[in-house]
Amino acid sequence: MNAVPEEVLRARAYLSRVAEPPAPGLAELVAEIGPVRAAERVRRGELGERAAAETSARRSVERAEADLRAAAAAGVRLLTPEHPDWPAAPLADLAACGVGDLAPPVALWVRGPGHLAALCARAAGVVGARAATAYGLHVAGEFGAGLAGTGHTVVSGAAIGIDGAAHRGALGVAGPTVAVLACGADRAYPAAHQGLLARIAETGLVVSEYPPGSVPARHRFLVRNRLIAGLSAATVVVEAGLRSGATRTATDAATLGRPVLAVPGPVTSGVSAGCHRLVRDGAVLVTRVEEVLEELGPIGAHLAADPPGARLALDALDPVGRLVHDALPAREAREVGWLAREAGVPVGAVRVALVDLERRGMVDHRDGRWQLRPQHLRAGG
Amino acid sequence: MNAVPEEVLRARAYLSRVAEPPAPGLAELVAEIGPVRAAERVRRGELGERAAAETSARRSVERAEADLRAAAAAGVRLLTPEHPDWPAAPLADLAACGVGDLAPPVALWVRGPGHLAALCARAAGVVGARAATAYGLHVAGEFGAGLAGTGHTVVSGAAIGIDGAAHRGALGVAGPTVAVLACGADRAYPAAHQGLLARIAETGLVVSEYPPGSVPARHRFLVRNRLIAGLSAATVVVEAGLRSGATRTATDAATLGRPVLAVPGPVTSGVSAGCHRLVRDGAVLVTRVEEVLEELGPIGAHLAADPPGARLALDALDPVGRLVHDALPAREAREVGWLAREAGVPVGAVRVALVDLERRGMVDHRDGRWQLRPQHLRAGG
């Protein structure tokens, strides 16, 4: 199931612990020379100024194998950009926006059966205040259920209040939901949400960029918020104080060029003040799930064209695999003979390449015809 | 105090009853040839198609003098565009927008000590649902008090619900407020607001374009709303259903190019649905009086440049009066000698002209210096 070489996994596991996110210098280095060489360079301290500063404190911490073992014991696996489940397109904007605070994660530790790329192909963040009102909890539950009921993944932070209500709304209709944590994916935080996190891990996915056992340090909640924004096509703020984590998530979403939606409430309610401020600053006011769906647009419409992550996956192909991949049209299924002609590759070699592409999760086949998986759709040819 | 010739008053009183507002054909005719000649033409039926259609049913109803007497008996006076209290600049957009449904009134019947032009120099409409919630009533009262407390006139429709709360908020801080009725200004409608209307008439102004005794026919509420929008620099909708009178007032304000502001509320509240729709359509979301004040801008900023009504007032001046008026700079007070030189008119004639201009309410003097009244400020020279 996991086609990523052990060497790459171990390098990413090491890198995942060696720098406190966000680590833009490290992210850039990895994008440039790949995880294995990047890990070697970090260990040797042969780094530019920024990456050196990010990694100097922990570069001798060699816990990759221990972390992978601890993760496995807790049902957590390490998802890396080399894996077909990696949400490359949704996260592409984190690197592309050029804002260091929004640097992409070097890997994600995930718990649950969900395929993250597929879950993020149509996903909305639903976030808000811990000290929510009964009104806010009601709306968050309705939105969670309404989004999940129409096949959209509800991404949130599993916090008490709005986050929890949104997850529960999704679970209530047996819909997809993803919790992004500010601590290790093996931990149950907040403790009161141990049951909720267990339920999410049964059908959806619990996600964290922090290695197993990491504590929910205060600053990690804000850092984590960029991943909620990044994994979501749009972010809905249900209730939020003026300066709150949820408005920070909204700011991150706006920086990434994603729509920010806000639910109004009484002007006399402090936890609606952040939502009203967002609307006054340009967020879209939403009152019903249908209005959220309008902003989400057609499935996958938010995915960046030819994102870096997708390119990484293509770079891993051999030349024939690449030719066959590029021959597949954007939205149609084709037979092997047609692909052989189009790619200029013998039929036998096309068959071998297609099996490899399928193993990598990049193509599907049905009735003897092959097509690209949605998250691998290219724009512009 | 009232410098308008009897002949003009009687003509306007006749015209005020001869057509059911809005009467764009009649408004155009009066603007073209003046009220006295227009009244003659209406009586004789010498009219274009549109004005004829508007006036044919009632052109033989000769009740001008009776109406003026009945009005006087009820403490109501007829305010016409020839009077300095006429809010020419605020109402200029009604004619200028070219939308027949928003045609300007031919005259206004007013009850109370207020000077309408002065009251409208800094005025905000505060409107909303009859079936308001306790929340809406609270916000309307706060906004009414906050606006009136900063010297802004609260314009509304005296209806049960939001309107009443806005008026009461203004009265509570002894601030200025104007009620625009859909029936005669001598009537107390709604009956439950007899006391409220009496209080408004004591310090502010009760206004109607309908002659004394007119009943509050259903369609008149929507027609009346254009005057609330027209007399206000901006219109605030506090609570409103999706298709309501208040959202109609907001639409009128938008058509007139005036800011539309809306107060959010719970998405579960039907009487906030109209407000949310307005925000989604481009209205400014406001949560506090300060945010309303921001949209109102500096005093008089909303007044149209050189509006038709102001021109009417100037047309009534004799040539020397016009020269002296035009010599007065926009925002400075000047001595008679300076004005004589600037206007090229002997000092004695300037003094006579200034007394006339003061009588017309177009200039003020203090410490031997004269200046234009704010509502007579010209733009562009």
Image (cartoon, coloured by chain):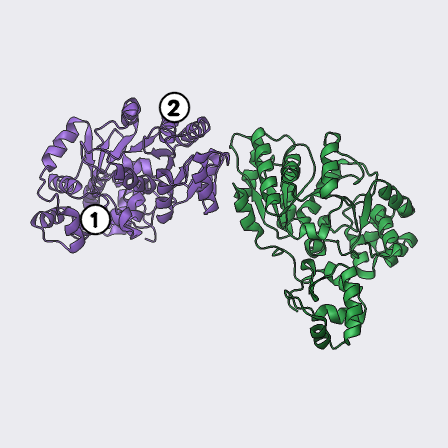
Chain colours: A purple, B green
* Whether residue A305 can be seen here: yes
Provide the chain ID for the residue under circle 2. Answer: A
Residue depicted at x 79% and y 58%: B31
Give the amino acid type for the residue marked by disc 2 in the picture: Gly
Q: Quadrant of the N terminus of chain A?
A: top left
Quadrant of res B141: top right
Residue at left offset 48%, top offset 35%: A290
Residue A68 at x, y percent in the picture: 14, 33
Give the answer, above or below, for where A86 lies relative to B345.
above
Q: Amino acid at mark 1?
A: Ala
What chain does mark 1 sit on? A
Taking the image as shown, residue A230 lies to the left or right of residue A20, namely right
Q: Which mark is residue B181?
A: none
Camera-nearest residue between A27 and A252? A252
> Residue A300's spot in the image, x, y percent?
37, 42
> Label 2 belongs to which residue?
A172
Total labels drawn: 2
Point out residue A100 in the picture as x, y percentages from the top left corner.
Answer: 26, 50
Q: Tell me where residue A328 appears, x and y as whole percent.
A: 29, 47
Residue A297 visible? The answer is no
Tell me the CA gap for discs 1 and 2.
Answer: 37 Å
Q: Is residue B238 left or right of residue B65?
A: left
Name above or below for residue A273 compared with residue A76: below
What is the crowding at mark 2: few (fewer than 14 residues within 10 Å), some, or many (at least 20)? some
State the SS at label 2. helix
- The answer to which quarter of the image holds residue B221 is top right
Q: Pointer 1: what residue? A: A27
Q: Is residue B299 left or right of residue A46?
A: right
- Badge 1 marks a residue whose secondary structure is helix
Do residues under tags 1 and 2 come within 8 Å of each other at their CB atoms?
A: no
Pick whichever, A324 or B245, lies toward us. B245
- Furthest toward the top, the residue is A195
